Amino acid sequence: MERYALFMKVYTHRVKTSASAMLGKALQLVLGTKRGQLNENSIERMGDEELLTAIHSTRSQQASRIIAALQNRRLFKPVFRAQALEENQRTISGYEAKQVQWREAGLFDPQIRINKEEEIAKKAKVDPSDVVLYCTHNAPGAQKVRYYVDVASDGSRKLVADSDQFNQSMLRAHLALWRVYAFCNPELADEKKEQIASSAQYIFGCVNEIKNIASRPALPLFGGGARR
């Protein structure tokens, strides 16, 4: 239970998620471009400040705007947040079915997400750098809860989560942490935020937990933004 509590407080914290989403988008915008020598191998050796400077040096206007917001501690605001799985879907089969559905929709592909962000931005009439979708392939910690208990004569292993009541309960708890988000520039007009939230709800097919978007304050930034 201590490990679950740690995920609740740190891994899924909305501030960490917003910073990670922003940095992840900025990186995707510049990785593989010809604007600089930034690539996956080079960023592994960089510290946070060096990485932010390197992204600026690529001359990507969208990426630079996002990094400037991070450096000025202006985190993007969540306008859409939803649990990926409804309560009756929090099983191995429900989890894997949702992964297949979103994989086929391209939601786990960073470049396809950027394309969808551009579509949302165009519809809301804002800059694409003002919109970030956040969608992870795995529920936080769920892969650590799942384990094999049945080994067939041919050596194949069958995943049986139902065999242990505590393990099954922990699995459901971790699956409940699996959330998707849409973040946007907090300086946007309220009607723009509403449009972005509506588009995100359509893309993910999940009900938005945020009911009053206009009244939500901007997020304070603590520490340094974690990389996604």
Image (spheres, rainbow, N blue to C red):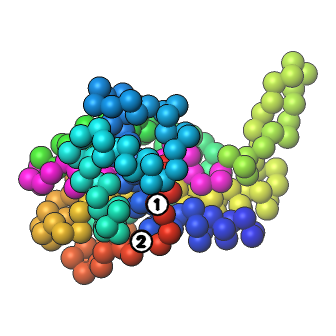
Q: Identify the disc placed on residue 221.
A: 2
Name which residue type carries label 2.
Answer: Leu
Residue at the spot 36% in from the left edge and 54% down from the top edge: 22
Residue 69 point in image, percent of width and height: 29, 62
Whether residue 130 is visible, yes or no, is yes
Quadrant location of the N terminus?
Answer: bottom right
Q: Residue furthest top?
A: 154
Name which residue type carries label 1.
Answer: Gly
In the image, taking residue 105 as reference, residue 6 lies left or right, namely right
How packed mark 2 is, by other alpha carbons closer than 10 Å (few <14, some 14-19, many 20 or more), is some
Q: Residue furthest left?
A: 125
How packed mark 1 is, by other alpha carbons closer than 10 Å (few <14, some 14-19, many 20 or more), is many
Name the residue beneath numbered marker 1.
Answer: 225
In the image, taking residue 177 as reference, residue 55 lies left or right, namely left
Residue 48 point in image, percent of width and height: 48, 53
Residue at the spot 78% in from the left edge and 33% down from the top edge: 158
Q: Contact (CB < 8 A) between labels 2 and 1? A: yes
